[in-house]
Structures are given as structure tokens and as C-alpha cells.
């Protein structure tokens, strides 16, 4: 809302309710906005708290998967003779060429 729009709304409210009711209306509006902000902050906080547990679980699972993958990689590498693998790759490459 721009400044001109706010002035039009204030003038319309002044004409509808009169100058003596404007402070009451302003107080009620301010109270309503405070309540709305409080409720929205409460909802946001509850959402953050509930998703924190899920994020923690996901982080734990991710760490376990990463640890297991690293361990499996290490185990596979310990069984592979790199010179034999290189020879097999060279043999396969030669078979494909000729």
C-alpha cells in the first residue's frame, strides 16, 4: 500500500466512524496486529521445533551412509590389485580395438 492509498483509507474511516472513534479503532487494529504477529511467530517456532528432529534424523542417516560408503570403498580397494585391474582394462581395450 502506498502513501496515497493509506490517506484515502484514513479519510474514509474518519468519515464513517468519526474522529472520536478513531483512537479506539486504532487501538483495536494494533491489538489485532500484535495478536496476529504473536500467533504467526508461535506457528513458526512450532514448525522449526518439529522439523529440527527430522533434520537431526536426516543428518544422522546421512552420516551413517557416508561412513558405510567410505568403509565399503576402503574394503573394495584393499581387495583390488591395481596393477591387475590396469592390465585387465588394457586387455579389454585391445580386444575392443581388434
Image: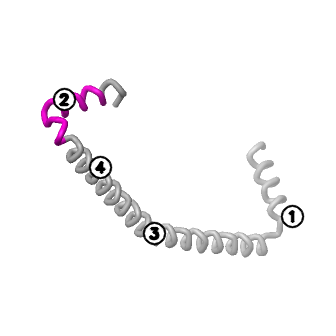
* Classed neighbour count for the residue bearing mark 4: other residues with Cα under 10 Å, few (<14), some (14–19), many (≥20): few
Secondary element under disc 3, as helix, strand or loop, is: helix
Q: Going from the N terminus, do you reach mark 3 or mark 4 first?
A: 4
Residues at discs 1 and 3 in contact (Cβ within 8 Å): no
What is the number of the mark on residue 35? none
Residue receiving disc 1: 83
In the picture of the structure, the residue carrying the numbered disc 3 is 54
Residue 56 forms part of the magenta stretch = no
- Left or right: 35 as drawn, with respect to 16: right
Which of labels 1 and 2 is toward the front?
2
Question: Mark 1 vs mark 2: which is more N-terminal?
Answer: 2
Q: Are marks 1 and 2 in contact (CB under 8 Å)?
A: no
Which residue matches tag 4? Answer: 30
Q: Nearer the viewer, mark 1 or mark 4?
A: 4
Q: Nearer the viewer, mark 1 or mark 3?
A: 3
Residue 12 image label:
2
Q: Cβ–Cβ below 8 Å for labels 2 and 3?
A: no
- Are the two marked residues, 2 and 4, in contact with CB atoms closer than 8 angstroms? no
- Residue beneath the point at 43% across and 64% down: 48
Quarter of the rendering occupied by the N terminus: top left
Query: Which stretch is magenta?
Result: 6-21
Q: State the separation of the CA atoms marked 1 and 2.
A: 87 Å
Residue 78: image quadrant is bottom right
Q: Is residue 6 left or right of residue 62?
A: left
Q: For numbered disc 1, what is the local secondary structure?
A: helix
Amino acid at each position: 500500500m502506498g502513501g496515497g492509498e493509506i490517506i484515502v483509507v484514513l479519510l474514509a474511516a474518519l468519515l464513517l466512524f468519526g474522529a472520536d472513534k478513531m483512537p479506539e479503532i486504532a487501538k483495536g487494529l494494533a491489538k489485532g496486529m500484535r495478536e496476529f504477529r504473536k500467533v504467526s511467530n508461535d506457528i513458526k517456532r512450532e514448525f522449526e521445533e518439529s522439523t529440527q528432529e527430522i533434520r537431526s534424523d536426516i543428518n544422522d542417516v546421512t552420516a551413517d551412509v557416508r561412513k558405510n560408503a567410505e568403509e565399503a570403498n576402503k574394503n573394495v580397494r584393499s581387495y583390488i590389485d591395481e596393477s591387475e585391474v590396469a592390465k585387465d582394462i588394457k586387455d579389454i581395450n585391445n580386444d575392443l580395438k581388434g
